[in-house]
């Protein structure tokens, strides 16, 4: 934990930013709820999950955590996700926005639009030219709150170059949506590049918890 916090602080110092401007999201997919509780005891409050079938029971056991859904989301899982997520990072279609909005009750659900940096449909995200269409669908739902953008660095690209593109998209997006100031980008391997390009939320898994085989 101390090593990750130190990396974030150093990256912020290099970028001329306050470390408090970056939210650490501990990605706990494939890890047991005991690890979530341990991280909570160390001061981590934000947790990210990729799969509803893992996230829902963990969120039920650790309701004091702030839960982020960060993986690709099918519309048929929206009914479950809206019951525990504070923020969904991966809205990538008007249809998904509508599904989430129709099922959310109570406090508005914060959402990020996932923008594709490599046009790979397997990794999710919308082309930059379609951001307005998805944003309009989010804004049409009173139960949703548009907070910003999310992206994953392409597998075969320089993350610094990719995140610089993302930063430009974010600045352009904020011209029409000034409250959409969240930029979710960066993982264990590329958090430094992401912070240099304005990331406000970094999604850290292996650097906190080590590597585990994926669940089947």
Image (spheres, grey):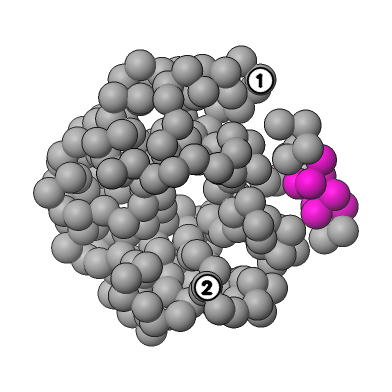
Q: Kindly state the secondary structure of the residue where label 1 is placed.
A: loop
Task: Place residue 166 in its image quadrant.
Answer: bottom right
State if disc 1 and disc 2 touch (CB < 8 Å): no
| Residue segment shown in magenta | 6-13
The residue identified by callout 2 is 155
Q: CA distance from mark 2 to mark 1?
A: 32 Å
Instruction: Look at 32% across and 70% down and name the residue there.
Output: 122
Residue drawn at x 42%, y 22% as measured from the top left: 33
| In the image, residue 11 lies in the stretch drawn in magenta | yes
- Provide the major secondary structure of the magenta segment: helix
- Graded by Cα atoms within 10 Å as few (under 14), some (14 to 19) or many (20 or more), the crowding at tag 2 reads few
Q: Would you call the spot at circle 1 few (<14 residues within 10 Å), some (14-19), or many (20 or more)?
A: few
**Front residue (pair 78, 54):** 54
- The x, y position of residue 212, in whole percent, is 49, 40
Which dot marks residue 42? 1
Q: Determine whether 2 is above or below 89 in the image.
A: above
Residue 112 location, quadrant:
bottom left
Residue 50: image x %, image y %? Answer: 36, 46
| 68 relative position to 7: left or right | left
């Amino acid at each position: 934990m101390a090593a990750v916090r130190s990396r974030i602080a150093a990256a912020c110092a290099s970028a001329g930013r306050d470390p408090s401007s970056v939210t650490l999201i501990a990605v706990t997919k494939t890890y047991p709820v005991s690890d979530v509780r341990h991280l909570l005891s160390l001061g981590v409050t934000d947790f990210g999950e990729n799969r509803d079938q893992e996230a829902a029971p963990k969120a039920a056991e650790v309701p004091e955590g702030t839960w982020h859904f960060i993986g690709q989301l099918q519309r048929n899982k929206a009914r479950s996700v809206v019951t525990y997520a504070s923020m969904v990072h991966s809205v990538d279609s008007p249809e998904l926005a509508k599904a989430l909005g129709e099922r959310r009750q109570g406090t508005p659900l914060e959402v990020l639009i996932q923008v594709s940096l490599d046009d790979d449909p397997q990794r999710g995200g919308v082309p930059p030219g379609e951001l307005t269409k998805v944003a309009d669908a989010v804004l049409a739902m009173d139960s949703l709150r548009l907070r910003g953008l999310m992206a994953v660095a392409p597998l075969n690209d320089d993350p610094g170059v990719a995140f610089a593109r993302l930063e430009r998209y974010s600045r352009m997006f904020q011209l029409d949506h000034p409250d959409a100031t969240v930029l979710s980008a960066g993982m264990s391997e590329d958090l430094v590049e992401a912070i240099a390009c304005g990331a406000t939320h970094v999604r850290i898994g292996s650097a906190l918890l080590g590597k585990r085989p994926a669940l089947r």
